[in-house]
Image (tube, helix red, strand yellow):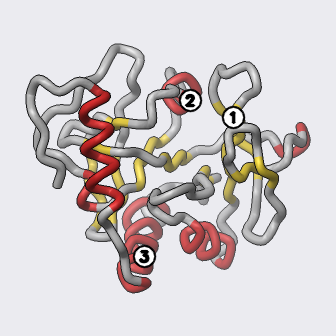
């Protein structure tokens, strides 16, 4: 758990969150447990099979590759985000395990920019640096997910290590979207 201070701004929280996240090392069993929670606690209770948007991991983010592979094995359609060139958010492209990715100008692995694969996911799973008990998500500061998901009727789920949680309220602004839940290896935390 991240221990912060009430007078911290987002900059201080990001530093502490990166430090906490960078110390985490999960076993394959813990990744498998997170995958089990995703399927049993989020996807199976949904009325219909969702189109699940995940992300391709960078750095020390929670590694989503096992999730992507397992969803493909179960016949669940997936998508990956692509950062818009104009900086107005993300576009989601249908993508299945094993399809090629390209390196973007943001040093991300993204699906190819093909208009025929554009899609609208029903479940968006987001990376984050920290989260609190109210569903506030601290991201990297670019606001891509906030701009993209503002006003959308989509289930918003963060993906994190348990160590990225804080009991203190994170700073947020009106444009910061709240998450519906967070998936960690120990289970699902719901906020709404």
Closer-to-camera residue (59/120)? 59
**Mark 1 sits on what residue?**
83
Image location of residue 75, percent across then percent down: 69, 71
- Is 70 placed left or right of 46 in the picture? right
How would you rate the neighbour count of disc 2 (Cα within 10 Å): few for under 14, some for 14-19, many for 20 or more? some
Give the answer, above or below, for where 168 lies relative to 17: above
Mark number, residue 55: none
Closer-to-camera residue (166/158)? 166
Closer-to-camera residue (105/153)? 105
Q: In what quadrant of the picture does the N terminus appear? A: bottom left
Residue, x 45% and y 72% (percent of image)? 35
Label 3: state its secondary structure: helix
How would you rate the neighbour count of disc 1 (Cα within 10 Å): few for under 14, some for 14-19, many for 20 or more? some
Query: What whole-number distance in Å separates the C-alpha atoms at marks 3 and 1?
Result: 26 Å
Label 2: state its secondary structure: helix
Earlier-in-chain disc, 3 versus 1: 3
Image location of residue 141, percent across then percent down: 45, 29
Image location of residue 20, percent across then percent down: 26, 55
Quarter of the image where one finds residue 72? bottom right
Quarter of the image where one finds residue 34? bottom left
**Mark 2 sits on what residue?**
144
Earlier-in-chain disc, 2 versus 1: 1
**Mark 3 sits on what residue?**
31
Toward the bottom, the furthest residue is: 29
How would you rate the neighbour count of disc 3 (Cα within 10 Å): few for under 14, some for 14-19, many for 20 or more? many
Quarter of the image where one finds residue 184? bottom left
Query: What whole-number distance in Å separates the C-alpha atoms at marks 2 and 3?
Result: 26 Å
Would you say the residues marked 2 and 1 are in contact, meaning their CB atoms lie under 8 Å apart? yes
Earlier-in-chain disc, 2 versus 3: 3
């Amino acid at each position: 758990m991240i221990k912060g201070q009430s007078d911290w701004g987002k900059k201080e929280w990001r530093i502490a969150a990166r430090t906490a996240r960078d110390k985490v090392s999960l076993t394959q069993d813990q990744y498998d447990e997170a995958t089990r929670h995703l399927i049993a606690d989020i996807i199976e209770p949904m009325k219909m099979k969702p189109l699940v948007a995940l992300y391709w991991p960078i750095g020390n983010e929670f590694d989503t590759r096992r999730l992507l592979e397992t969803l493909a094995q179960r016949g669940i359609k997936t998508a990956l985000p692509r950062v818009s060139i104009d900086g107005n958010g993300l576009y989601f492209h249908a993508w299945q395990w094993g399809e090629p990715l390209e390196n973007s100008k943001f040093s991300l692995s993204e699906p190819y920019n093909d208009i025929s694969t554009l899609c609208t996911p029903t479940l968006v799973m987001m990376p984050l640096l920290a989260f609190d008990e109210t569903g506030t998500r601290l991201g990297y500061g670019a606001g891509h997910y906030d701009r993209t998901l503002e006003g959308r009727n989509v289930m918003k789920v963060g993906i994190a290590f348990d160590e990225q949680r804080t009991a203190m309220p994170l700073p947020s602004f009106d444009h910061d979207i709240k998450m519906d839940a967070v998936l960690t290896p120990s289970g699902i935390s719901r906020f709404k």
